[in-house]
Image (cartoon, grey):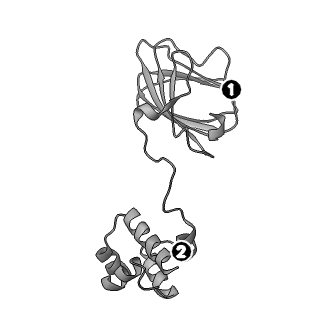
Amino acid sequence: MTDDVGARLRSLRKLRGISQRELAKQCGVTHSSLSLIEQGKVSPSVSSLKKILNAFAISVGDFFTMDLDNQEQIFYLPEELVDIGSGDITLKLVGANRPNRGLAFLIEHYPPGTDTGNEMISHYGEEAGVVLEGEIELTVGSSVRRLGPGESYYFKTNVPHRFRNVSSVDCRIVSCATPGKAF
């Protein structure tokens, strides 16, 4: 158990990007004591462990239950994004391989003249986005608006909606929708 506490503490400290000396200074424990704890040579008392964990603003319970060795992919190269679009519309999904995703984060590309279809889309959840370049005509229910760079939207997706690029230039959008299971 001593090794486990030390290894977890070292992982947490490195995850937060703090040196042993800095952590020792922040929590009022000597650097040598902290080093011995991390090496698994000394088991800290509950009060000492609480003192150290206060520097990270986490509880003892969270310390023992949090996943410090996250095995899920965190970073994605552009070529690793999955295209869930259709036709000429590109919808690059970030984190498509993550199980139990709670959201869909998309990088969208609409060439001139493209749209999401004649039929309006509706599904459970919410969606928000920002136009990075170009223009998009967004219809949500009976509301229609042409959005340009820097303009944003946020709506409940059970309201029928449609995206159309009626301009002569490409449109790029970054968006996020819930729940991820819809994608």
Disc 1 designates what residue?
160
Which residue is located at x 56 percent, y 27 percent? 84
In this rendering, the label closer to the viewer, 1 or 2: 2
Q: Is residue 28 visible?
A: no
Tell me: 2 left or right of 24: right
Tell me the SS state at disc 1.
loop
Q: Nearer the viewer, residue 155 or 79?
A: 79
The C terminus is located in which quarter? top right
Tell me: 14 left or right of 87: left
Real-space Cα distance between discs 1 and 2?
A: 45 Å
Which residue is located at x 37 percent, y 65 percent? 14
**Dot 2 alpha-carbon crowd within 10 angstroms: few under 14, some 14 to 19, many 20 or more:** few
Of the two numbered discs 1 and 2 on the same chain, state the one appearing first in sequence: 2
Which residue is located at x 40 percent, y 62 percent? 15
Q: Nearer the viewer, residue 137 or 87?
A: 87
Classify residue 157 by image quadrant. top right
Tell me the SS state at disc 2.
loop
**Dot 1 alpha-carbon crowd within 10 angstroms: few under 14, some 14 to 19, many 20 or more:** some
Residue 93 locus on image (x, y percent): 52, 34
Above or below 37: residue 107: above
Above or below 109: residue 179: below
Above or below 48: residue 150: above
Classify residue 39 by image quadrant. bottom left
Q: Is residue 143 visible?
A: yes
Give the total of numbered labels. 2
Residue 42 locus on image (x, y percent): 42, 86
Disc 2 designates what residue?
59
Instruction: Identify residue type, mark 2.
Output: Ser
Residue 3 locus on image (x, y percent): 47, 77
Q: Give the label on residue 152, or none.
A: none
Tell me: 136 left or right of 39: right
